[in-house]
Amino acid sequence: MKKNLLALGLVVLMTPALLNAQKVACKIKGSDTCLPLSQKFAEHYMKKNPGSSISVIGGGSGVGLAALISGTTDVAQASRKMKMDEKLKLQSGGKAVKETVIAYDALAIIVNPGNKVTQLTREQLAGIFTGKIKNWKQVGGDDMGIIVYSRETSSGTYDFIKEHVLLNKNYTASALMMPATGAIVQSVSQTKGAIGYVGLAYLDKAVKALKVAYKKGAYVEPSVETAKNKTYPITRPLYYYYTSNVEGRVKPLINYILSPEGQNLVLKEGYVPLN
Amino acid sequence: MNIRKTTEKIVEGVLFSSSTVTTVAVLFIIFFLFKSGIGLFQDSPVEKNYAIALNANNPVKNLSAKQIKDIFNGDITNWKQVGGKDGDIELFTLNELGSAYTEEQIGSNLEHIPTCLNEYVKQHENVITYFDKKFYPRNFQGKVLDIPKISVIDFLLGKEWYPTSTPAALFGVLPLIIGTLFVTFFAILFALPIGLITAVYMAEIANERTRRFLKPVIELLAGIPSVVYGFFGLVVLVPLIQQTFNLPVGETALAGSLILGIMALPTIITISEDAIRTTPIVLKEASLGLGATHWQTLLRVTLPYARSGIMAAFILGIGRAVGETMAVLMVTGNAAIMPHSLLAPVRTIPATIAAELGEAPMGGTHFKALFALGIILFIITFVFNSLVEVVKSKKEK
């Protein structure tokens, strides 16, 4: 009996060790939105599983997916869904692609703190970003021109806002295109009539986040809570793409990301966990 | 003796091969640039594997990319505006399919999408739709539009740059070309006088101690990374311009020109100073000997003699400014509109390439368009560099 217990104890003790012996060697490349998150995942995973080597590279969703197609990365991180073009290219290379949602990101609409406006509907936002609404007084603010700040076309965030807020209409040609999210925060904080959009993780006191309503009267403030309970409308999934031939190699990492521990990291980094 | 000969041969070989490698690399890059860029003109502005279709009875036969963009943007709302019959345009995409048909009709595996599409297009006279060709209905009773390929004229003279517009992208680079030249022109306008004055001061007026202090400082200016200039511009210059001129936005062509001007200064100063200093002392002494003052000698003898060197400095400065990316990207606002004032945002070619190449699907139309922009930039700098050669050869005569 004692012996049995001892054996059981040994097994129990060894189980985590066995589970931990999942060395992963892989390369993750793509979206800059996912970059800080992937780095955290890699850091923690490598600490837990010595011997693993995970390298994380940014460059943009398109860059990551292009690398996946050419076979120079194992995982492509993306803040948008794979485009038809890219899917076809992968398929013609004879590779089946797997998609995993690793977290959600909420996008906040920001204005200068001196702006009177505190909330907007989706229609108003679409009007502003397409250039149909040009003055803040048209949406209940002061008589002041609206300056639209947008990310560059290369950004997955740009695509997402275009698809889900502008309903595929185009941004106004006079929108100012900024190379980085940080630059949008900086510019909006120093420009009175400015409006822009940034990921929740980038919000700070220098700018004011607007409440947004997709349904009439239901204005919701952006926060991790409202994004998590799906009341805040401008949330988007972040993806990992990999081909099925490397599935065995990257699966342990994916499992870690989807585990409560991994999702806890998501929350800590200012993104929205899956559930 | 033999060893020396062999060594010489080896050194010769190394020199030869390294210059060959350099030449081949340059030629390869140019070849790659042109090959990728020219491909743009064999592409349609509509995303690959997508079809745009109308009702079969619609008299409209073809639409330009701009018309398609305006239709899906809601700026053109009546078929009359594009040469059709009077009737409101009805936009229909796969999103609307979900509300027009029940889930049952579409099928649990979406297998009936082609049938629904076919039916909808057949029944609605004023419809325009675009869909993935994998949903292309058998015996399609609508009319698939023939979209003309992107033409060189549309590319060079188009005024709208909407590279990711769906279903049809617009690649009009005129605002970008003008924006680049505009920012460069004002940068030089600002940098040339200051650069020239500094060069004259350093070469002719400053004493040795001042010169020994100034020269490294100016050369240091060339060593500062451009992203630092950009950051300085965004945080210091942009708010300053905004307040001084009481503008709604500080990210303007002026901010870009100032930053570029500062960045072009070291090139202009160093090269023109060298040119001024190489004026033969006998010429100056002859002039002074004839009774001319120091100033008269400077204006009538030294500067005319150094003219071609100063021209070369000026042109190389332009070359530096035209191709500069990062600093401009951060301070000009990058709105793709035709520049009409120094106090409005502009977008330049290098900034566009740097900002957009990252997520343009590789080998796609957008990707090729960016390479085509690279060709334009290459031609601009090539012209400037050739001008330097022309100016130099003039001096030798």
Image (spheres, coloured by chain):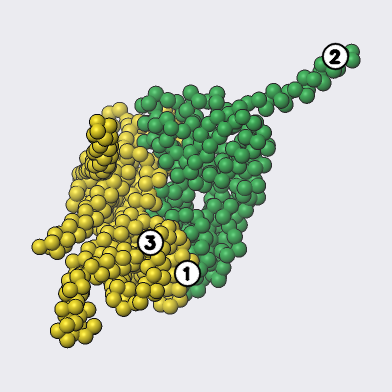
Chain colours: A green, B yellow
Residue at (65% x, 36% y) in the render:
A47
* Drawn side of residue B272 relative to residue B230, left or right: left
Q: Residue at x 32, y 30 (%)?
A: B137
Q: Tell which subunit mark 2 falls on.
A: A
The answer to whether residue B55 shows anywhere in this view is no
**Residue A75, labelled with which disc?**
none
Q: Earlier in the sequence, mark 3 or mark 1?
A: 3
Residue type beneath disc 2: Asn
Name the residue that disc number 2 marks.
Answer: A4
Q: Nearer the viewer, residue B54 or A166?
A: A166
**Residue wearing tag 3:** B222
Tell me what residue is drawn at x 32 percent, y 45 percent. Answer: B366
Tell me the distance, in whole angstroms, between the alpha carbons under discs 2 and 3: 76 Å
| Proximity of marks 3 and 1: CB atoms separated by less than 8 Å | no
Label 1, secondary structure: give it. Answer: helix
Foreground mark, 2 or 3, reads 3
Look at the numbered disc 2 and give the secondary structure of its residue: helix
**Mark 3 residue type:** Ala
In the image: residue A72, left or right of residue B176:
right
Quadrant placement of the C terminus of chain A: top right
From mark 2 to mark 1, how far is it between C-alphas?
74 Å
Q: Establish if B271 lies above or below B51.
A: below
Tell me the tag on residue B236.
1
The kind of secondary structure element at disc 3 is helix
Q: Position of residue B349 (x, y in %)?
A: 31, 55
